[in-house]
Image (cartoon, rainbow, N blue to C red):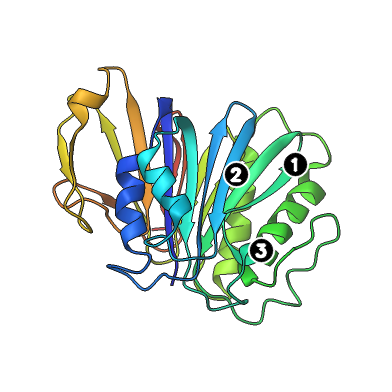
Amino acid sequence: MCELLAMSANVPTDIVFSFTGLAERGGVTGPHVDGWGITFYEGKGSRTFKDACPSSQSHIAQLIKSYPIKSEIVVSHIRQANRGCVSLENTHPFTRELWGRYWTYAHNGQLSEYEKKFISSRFQAVGDTDSEMAFCWILEQVVQQFGDTAPENMNVVFEYIAKLADEIRTLGIFNMILSDGIDLMAYCTNNLCHITRRAPFGKATLIDTDVVIDFQKETTPNDVVTVIATRPLTNNEQWQVLSAGDWRLFRLGDIRIEHSAV
């Protein structure tokens, strides 16, 4: 399976610490060697870095670990291929434009018997993964439901997307990160967790490599930062583990919608 990483913050924040831990799982502490990618939002714009090489060996990943790009929303993914070949076009995150905003998506899991369901015309997959086809289908359904103009209340859009994710989950494992550059959605089938850091800040230690950070030295008392990951990245913090069908919507580091399936 692949692994996900995302961040929502109320101030531009770098994700160097968390990404350093995730990158180790791309070939050192984990088997996810079939590519990686990361997207940083900056206002309405975004910048994406991808590589079909393992994140633990990638020179581009070394740049991300050493250069603190600050963003309020980040979406990242390391891949262990099960659908589609190892190639740049099959590397997450995937991005499409909708309603004048860049939507970014990453998926962890494997789906079956999806070809007849994921039919779309406006949004076309470039690669040959079940993940990208699911993303295109979701956006196609959103346009059919809400039209070519975004509704004033975007909460209803993400609530609808959660229902679509419930449908997709019947086809297999579907852990998803999705963002329109304002809100960040996390949907769980089997493995997804999150942690929100706010004052008083303390120290954190990565599980996958010998790195410790003192967040009190890196933040202000008003900072709020939420990190979402497939598995906890630190061993001395309390991560909130989601259950099947749970989903969260984050904005500026805080939970905007909290839905539990049970």
Q: Gap between marks 2 and 1, in whole Å?
A: 14 Å
Horizontal side of 176 relative to 1 (left or right) equals: right
Q: Nearer the viewer, mark 3 or mark 1?
A: 3
For the C terminus, the image quarter is bottom left
Q: Which mark is residue 158?
A: 2
- Label whose residue precedes the other's in the sequence (3 or 1): 3
Evaluate whether residue 175 shows in this view: no
Residue indicated by mark 3: 89
Residue indicated by mark 1: 98
Judging from the image, what secondary structure is the residue with disc 1 in?
strand
The x, y position of residue 72, in whole percent, is 47, 30
Residue at 68% across / 76% down in the picture? 114
Judging from the image, what secondary structure is the residue with disc 3 in?
helix
Marks 2/1 in contact by CB < 8 Å: the verdict is: no
Q: What amino acid type should be assigned to the residue bearing mark 3?
A: Glu
- Label whose residue precedes the other's in the sequence (2 or 1): 1
The x, y position of residue 123, in whole percent, is 79, 56
Q: Nearer the viewer, mark 2 or mark 1?
A: 1
- The number of discs equals 3
Q: Residue furthest front?
A: 59
Instruction: From this view, report whether residue 105 is shown above or below residue 182.
Output: below
Horizontal side of 189 relative to 94 (left or right) equals: left
Q: What amino acid type should be assigned to the residue bearing mark 2?
A: Phe
The x, y position of residue 259, in whole percent, is 44, 47
Residue 209: quarter of image: bottom left
Judging from the image, what secondary structure is the residue with disc 2 in?
helix
Q: What amino acid type should be assigned to the residue bearing mark 1?
A: Leu
Q: Gap between marks 2 and 3, in whole Å?
A: 26 Å
For mark 2, does the 10 Å Cα neighbourhood hold few (<14), some (14 to 19), or many (20 or more) residues?
many
Question: Depth check: 156 or 31 in front?
Answer: 31
Evaluate whether residue 114 shows in this view: yes
Instruction: From this view, report whether residue 69 is shown above or below residue 4.
Output: above
